[in-house]
Amino acid sequence: MGQCCACLRGILSSSGIEMSSSIHNNLQAEVLAVDVSAQQHSIDPEMSAPSIEITNDSSSQISGHGLALVDTTVEQDQAYWEWKVHVRGETGSKVPMFGVSNKRNSKFYEILADSSIPEEKHGTKFMCAVPGLEDGDVIGVVVQQSELPMIQLYKNGEIQDGLLVSRFRGTVYPSVYLPQSPGNGFSATFLYTEKQFIHGSPSPTITPLIAERSLM
């Protein structure tokens, strides 16, 4: 009888641990979900080109031309965000680029401004040019740090063959490049939450961008 009671206590104890672990995991998931939905990301003016204009009433909408970086690093293994493209007036022959870029500062842009390097090569090594964009098009960006390709672009919910980056290195930030055009025809809005997404992630395992502090 004593052995049976001991076994019963062991089973109950083990079940209690499993239940506690399950509850803890559920709570962690709920807290993380709240944190993600409450996060606010914006275009970082300190890391973006001086020719980029950030809309006053929306820190996630830009116009002008040059490279623009978001203020949050890509830390999670799989992440997704979108850019909604706006086209107004003449756009010229050059096209926007989407992907990620390493950290930049004002000195970076000052040095390049005095060089012969074309603006579209200013920090865009880990980005892809997307031709044929029309007003209202949405570019989805998938980052998978442990798989290849590490960056894959989608256009209006459809995967774009050839628009990918096999590898990138270092700390990176979501980024967009707007080309200079006769009428500054391109502008873009950064979308980073489930509520904002127009098309959404292609897989439930690829989640919205999470700030580094929320992963700790």
Image (tube, rainbow, N blue to C red):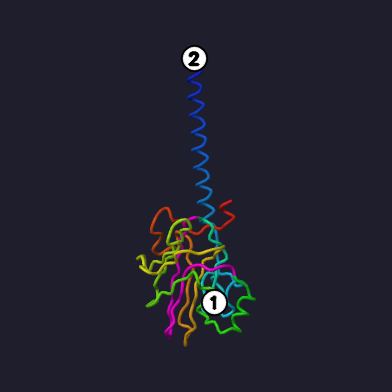
Work out which residue is located at the far right of the displayed protein and give it: 107
- The residue sitting at 47% across, 58% down in the picture is 79
Q: Which residue is mark 1?
A: 122
Going by the image, does 46 lie left or right of 90? Answer: right
Other residues around mark 1 within 10 Å, as few (<14) / some (14–19) / many (≥20): some
On screen, residue 25 above or below 77: above
* Cα–Cα gap, marks 2 and 1: 73 Å
The front one of 166 and 211 is: 166
On screen, residue 78 above or below 161: above
- Residue 33 point in image, percent of width and height: 50, 51
Extent of the magenta region: 77-103
- Residue 17 point in image, percent of width and height: 52, 32
- Residue 86 point in image, percent of width and height: 44, 76
Q: Amino acid at mark 2?
A: Gln
- The residue sitting at 53% across, 63% down in the picture is 169
Going by the image, does 134 lie left or right of 63? Answer: left
Q: Is 102 one of the magenta-colored residues? A: yes
Residue mark closest to the camera, 2 vs 1: 1
Q: Secondary structure at mark 1?
A: loop
Q: Which residue is mark 2?
A: 3
Work out which residue is located at the far bottom of the displayed protein and give it: 182
Q: Is 78 one of the magenta-colored residues? A: yes
Going by the image, does 165 lie left or right of 107? Answer: left
- The residue sitting at 57% across, 53% down in the picture is 214
- The residue sitting at 50% across, 47% down in the picture is 30
The front one of 145 and 69 is: 145
User: Which badge, 2 or 1, is on the more N-terminal residue?
Assistant: 2
On screen, residue 80 above or below 113: above
Q: Secondary structure at mark 2?
A: helix
- Residue 198 point in image, percent of width and height: 40, 64
